[in-house]
Every structure is written in C-alpha cells, then in structure tokens.
Amino acid sequence: MTPDVLLRKILDPANRADPYPLYAELRRTPVVRAGDGLFVVSTYWEIKSLLHDPRVSSDARNLSPGAGGSLLGDDEDASVLPPSFLRLDPPEHDRLRRMAMRPFGPPETPRRIHDMRGELDGIVSGLIDGFGDRKRVDLVDDFSYPFPVTVICRLLGVPREDEARFHTWADTIAAGLDPDPDDDPGDRRRVTQRARTELGAYLSGLIDERGGAPGDDMLSALVAQNGPDGRMSRMELLSTAALLLIAGHETTVNLITNGMLTLLRNPGVLARLRDDPGLAVPIVEELLRFEPPVQLLPQRTTLADIDLGDITVAKGSALWLVLASGNRDPRRFAEPDRFDPGRKDNQHLGFGSGIHTCFGAPLARLEAQIALSELARRLDNPRLVEDPPPYRRNAVLRGPRHLNIEFDGVRK
C-alpha cells in the first residue's frame, strides 16, 4: 500500500473505530513522504525528538507554498482571531503561555487545580444522580460532555447557559482541524471562519464585561493581568480565551469516553477500580497511551533541513506527527496493544511533549480520574449497548460520538 493510500485510509471515517492496524503498517517506514512536501512520522523516538527540536515550527506561516498538498487544511485567518499560542513559536509562544499560566497553575497559582477537587466531585456526583431511575444513558451526552464543559465555564467565568452557543462553534472549529481529503477545502474554511468570527464576537463581549466588573474567574485575571510580561493585547486575549474554552473540554470529553469504553472492554480492570479508586491514576496514564484523545498533530513545519534516518526532511516541509502510533510503538512499549494500567515507565505522548505539552494536562488528568472512579463505583453492572460505538468523523480528536451503556441501577 502506498503512503498516500495508507494515509487516506487513516483519515477515512470508516476506519475511525480501530485505526491501530493502519498505524502498525505506517510504522514499517518511520518517516514517509505522502503528497507534495508532506512527511508523516509514526514512531515514538522520532516523534519525541521532533517535539523537542527547535527546528520544528508550529507556525503555519513558515510552511513553504503548496507543502502538504490536498491533505492539509487551510490556515487560520488571523484577521478573525489570531493564532493561539499553540500555533506560535518562541519567543511569542513562551510569553503568551507564561501569561496564561499565571492564573491557572504554578508558580503564581500553585493550588488552583488542587483546590477544585471538591467542586469537581460535586459536579460528577450531580451528573450521576441525574441518571435517576434510568437503566440506559448516552455517556457522551449525559456525562462526558457536560462535566468538562461545566468545569471550564466555571474556571473561565463563562455563563453555563451559553453552552449551546459555544458547543456549535467548538464543534465546527474542531472539525476544521481535521484534514479530511473528502471535504471541499473552500467550504470548510468558510464554515470554520464564520464560527471563529462568531466566537470572537462572543468572547469580546465577555472581556468587556470582565474589564468593568471583574470576578474571581480566570478570564478576569487575564484581562487585569499586568505582570513581568506586560498585558495581553485584545486580540491575544481573544485567541487565548478561545483556546482555553475549546481545548478545555474537547479533549477531556474524548479522554473520559474512551476511558469508559476501554474499561467496559476490560471488566477485570473496571472491577479493580470499583474497589480501589486510587487505581484511577495509573489507569488514566495508560489510557493516555492506549487511546489518546489527540491522535495526530497535522500542523508542524521544518525551519531547516532535518535528517531522520536515511530521510532528509527539507526546510519548509509539512510534518504530521502521529502521536497515537508512537504510543503503540513496540520499540518503546512492550505489548503495546495490551491495555495494562500496571505498565512501568509509561512516558506516553498522550499530552504531547516539549514546549507545546498540553497546557491543561493537570486538570484533564484530575477530571478523568474522578469521572472514571465514580462511574466505576456507582454504576451497577454497566455494559455496552453496541461495540464499537459510532465515532466522530475527526481523525485528529478521535472519540465516540455516542456511547450508549446499560446498567442495573445507580448506587449512592
């Protein structure tokens, strides 16, 4: 199978339920050229090296014209919302990430996530209580989605009643990340930019409100911040707020849903978690390796020629880093296709690596640990209605669209 055909199979929604055999075939050639100026990297050590290589850029402006061919999505329109710091390189990336981190975590706010635990427990308990007398729920609609959305709304200070509006925008923007070769790129770009414009206008109104009447939320802190790096410009505030709002729930929905699906497929592990909630920590780490919510990073560019084995990736080339394939690389992980929460030295790529390591990883870990341990404890005899479940089309942010489960009742 040629690299182009293999890559199209990976991107084909028909293979979304189990892309891992395709990744295994891709790993036979750790670095392949697929399309004009596009290189796909699928093995652990090569991906890890590139994530730490300053010659690899996250800024699409460094991409050579035409690199990536028809499989690459269109660039973001900076006139609508400028690129978030995820799409920038140092020093701009480092400055904006430091500023976003100050009201979120160490060193300036070291206890913010830790002190949210009681609130997270309460949200999870309320959602499971909401199952009532039902014996069947869609875990995505009834739990995995509303939990992180409620959390990020409270953290940022976004009114929960506006969720329906930004849900639509978030879905559209997330779909725009997906390099689907069957989509018309012009139509996708127009739809995505319309969503970005509407989200930007909405966030602009919230920023104005916080400027006049600040609260104790993270958005207020970002608006008022004037530290060693100065203040964010209005456009930087907008792009950072949009990133936190969307990334703050999109990946966690998939992590929790993929996690429960995996536990239901491994009933022995589920039973152990029910008896010992402390197992949630290694279980979540293994889930991040085994079923990562972010499967690939399709938007990287080379700033210089880079030699990878006997392949030279030319300056200005497009790079795709297939994180989920690296996480199943047998050169790095023994029995990589086995779900093993007792796995030692589990340095997975589930949150990336290097300077772009997931900003919200501490919160996502805690949310998943609480969610899965409480679902295991409180649901009596949970089981899948269908396996595999229906999946979202997105090859980048991979997860079930719905996960219908049955159970005999809800424990207190």
Image: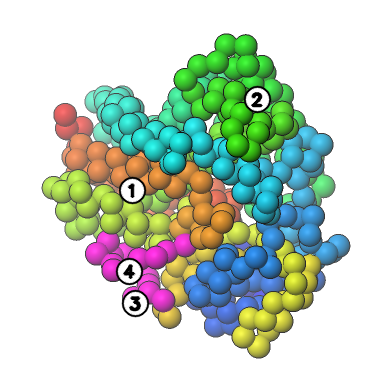
User: Could you tell which of marks 2 and 1 lies nearer the N-terminus?
Assistant: 2
**Residue depth check, mark 1 versus mark 4: number of the one nearer the observer:** 4
Q: Which residues are magenta?
A: 332-349
User: Could you tell which of marks 3 and 1 lies nearer the N-terminus?
Assistant: 1
Callout 4: helix, strand or loop? Answer: loop
What residue lies at 72% left-to-right and 54% top-to-bottom? 59
Q: Is residue 369 above or below residue 347?
A: above
Which residue was labeled with disc 2?
Answer: 203
What residue lies at 68% left-to-right and 51% top-to-bottom? 91
Q: Amino acid at mark 1?
A: Met
- The CA distance from mark 2 to mark 4 is 41 Å
**Residue depth check, mark 3 versus mark 4: number of the one nearer the observer:** 4
Callout 1: helix, strand or loop? Answer: helix
Residue 277: where, in percent of width, then height? 20, 46
Which residue was labeled with disc 3?
Answer: 334
- The CA distance from mark 3 to mark 4 is 11 Å
Callout 2: helix, strand or loop? Answer: helix
Q: Amino acid at mark 3?
A: Ala
Give the farthest residue toward the top. 213
Report the disc number at residue 345.
4
| Tag 3 near tag 2, CB within 8 Å | no
Report the disc number at residue 260.
1
Residue 328: where, in percent of width, then height? 43, 71
User: Could you tell which of marks 3 and 2 lies nearer the N-terminus?
Assistant: 2
User: Could you tell which of marks 2 and 4 lies nearer the N-terminus?
Assistant: 2
| Tag 1 near tag 4, CB within 8 Å | no
User: Could you tell which of marks 3 and 4 lies nearer the N-terminus?
Assistant: 3
- The CA distance from mark 1 to mark 4 is 23 Å
Q: Amino acid at mark 2?
A: Leu
